[in-house]
Image (spheres, grey):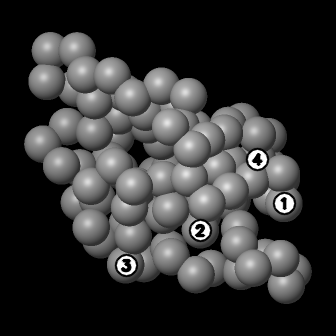
Amino acid sequence: MTGEDYRIITDRTVDGVRYIVAEPSAMVCSERIEFQVVEGKVHGLRYERGCNGNLQAIGRLLEGMPLETVVEKLRGVDCHGRGTSCTDQLARVVASIL
């Protein structure tokens, strides 16, 4: 599945847990976004590459957050005038799986 500027690599459900792996736009620092969805909430968010400390913090802050809230809070976050960011890419991926 391909989005505006990201690509969902894996979208599978096992025992009620939805596993998502996405490749964000080349315009951002991160190269991979992984998370699980349980009962409509984000769990285990992990980024590969990017601003490690900030992205770990985002994962902790979003743990257990409803998907819709993730999109509301993160959609449109811009990094250095690129028109997107690592967190905006997450919001775009999440919006596409709702």
Residue nearer the viewer, 64 or 32: 32
The residue that mark 1 highlights is 27
Q: Earlier in the sequence, mark 2 or mark 3?
A: 3
Per the rendering, the mark at residue 30 is 4
SS class of the residue under badge 1? loop
The residue that mark 3 highlights is 72
Q: Earlier in the sequence, mark 4 or mark 2?
A: 4
Q: Earlier in the sequence, mark 4 or mark 3?
A: 4
Give the distance between the C-alpha atoms of the residues marked 3 and 1, in whole angstroms.
21 Å
Other residues around mark 4 within 10 Å, as few (<14) / some (14–19) / many (≥20): many
Residue shown at 62% from the left, 79% from the top: 77
Look at the picture and state if 29 lies above or below 19.
below
Residue type beneath disc 4: Ser
Look at the picture and state if 79 lies above or below 41.
below
Residue nearer the viewer, 1 or 61: 1
Give the distance between the C-alpha atoms of the residues marked 2 and 3, in whole angstroms.
10 Å
Query: Are the residues tagged 4 and 3 within 8 Å (C-beta)?
Result: no
Residue type beneath disc 1: Met
Other residues around mark 1 within 10 Å, as few (<14) / some (14–19) / many (≥20): some
Q: Earlier in the sequence, mark 3 or mark 1?
A: 1
SS class of the residue under badge 3? helix
